[in-house]
Amino acid sequence: MPIAVGTKAPDFTLKSKTAEGLVDIKLSDQLGKKQVVLLFFPFAFTGVCTQEFCDVTSGLSSCAGLDAEVYGISVDSPFAQEAWAKQNKIGIKLLSDLNKTVIKAYEVAITLPVGETSARAAFVVGKDGVVKYAEQTPSPKELPTFAAIQAALK
């Protein structure tokens, strides 16, 4: 089960690959400025994850009007994430949890036949750093409830 609504969101610093190179993204840098949507997913280059992030790019772009920053988090390397994003025109900033510390802090680590990875999960973190919405899908094949995420942002 993921961490509960009302919990202080665990802070983290993760790597993201940008045109400028590898950059550190720290959750607490957003606090007080914007709400944050964290979308955990098992692996890049898989069918359901690709569908989710293509849907997110088109559907959750409305989060921009809701004053929210959206991050996708997986255990893939930032280089694999960058290649996947380019190949699939994914416009969400992807963060690499290669060491699996954040998936454990948010209590969404699962073991699949290929090893430990992230469950498919979504969190909305308020400007105050408190979790306003938390969802872990019953199966990695199921997508999060985007309407509920948007409702939590309003």
Image: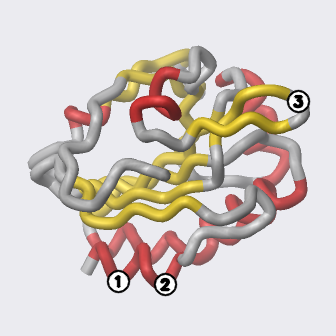
Location of mark 1 (residue): 151
The answer to which image quadrant residue 118 occupies is: top right
Tag 2, which secondary structure?
helix
> Which disc is residue 147 wearing?
2
In primary-sequence order, the first of circles 1 and 3 is 3
Q: Residue 107 vs residue 30: left or right?
A: right
Label 1 crowd bin: few (<14), some (14–19), many (20+), radius 10 Å: few
- Of 33 and 150, nearer the camera is 150
In primary-sequence order, the first of circles 2 and 3 is 3
- Location of residue 25 in the rendering, given as x and y in whole percent from the top left corner: 38, 28
Location of mark 3 (residue): 114
| Three-letter amino acid code of the residue under disc 1 | Ala
- Location of residue 39 in the rendering, given as x and y in whole percent from the top left corner: 53, 53
Is the C-beta separation of discs 2 and 1 under 8 Å?
Answer: yes
The answer to which image quadrant residue 81 occupies is: top right
Q: Which residue lies at the image location 31% right of the left edge and 56% below the top edge?
A: 4
What sort of colour scheme is used for the picture?
secondary structure
> Spatial distance from mark 1 to mark 3, Cα to Cα?
35 Å
Q: Against 1, is 73 above or below?
A: above
Question: Which quadrant does the C terminus fall into?
Answer: bottom left
| Three-letter amino acid code of the residue under disc 2 | Ala
Q: Against 143, is 121 above or below?
A: above
Q: Against 138, is 49 above or below?
A: above
Does any portion of residue 68 appear in the rendered image? yes
Q: Which residue lies at the image location 81% right of the left edge and 26% below the top edge?
A: 115
Q: Residue 84 vs residue 131: left or right?
A: right
Label 3 crowd bin: few (<14), some (14–19), many (20+), radius 10 Å: few
- Location of residue 134 in the rendering, given as x and y in whole percent from the top left corner: 40, 62
- Location of residue 131 in the rendering, given as x and y in whole percent from the top left corner: 26, 56
> Spatial distance from mark 2 to mark 3, Cα to Cα?
31 Å
> Which disc is residue 51 wearing?
none
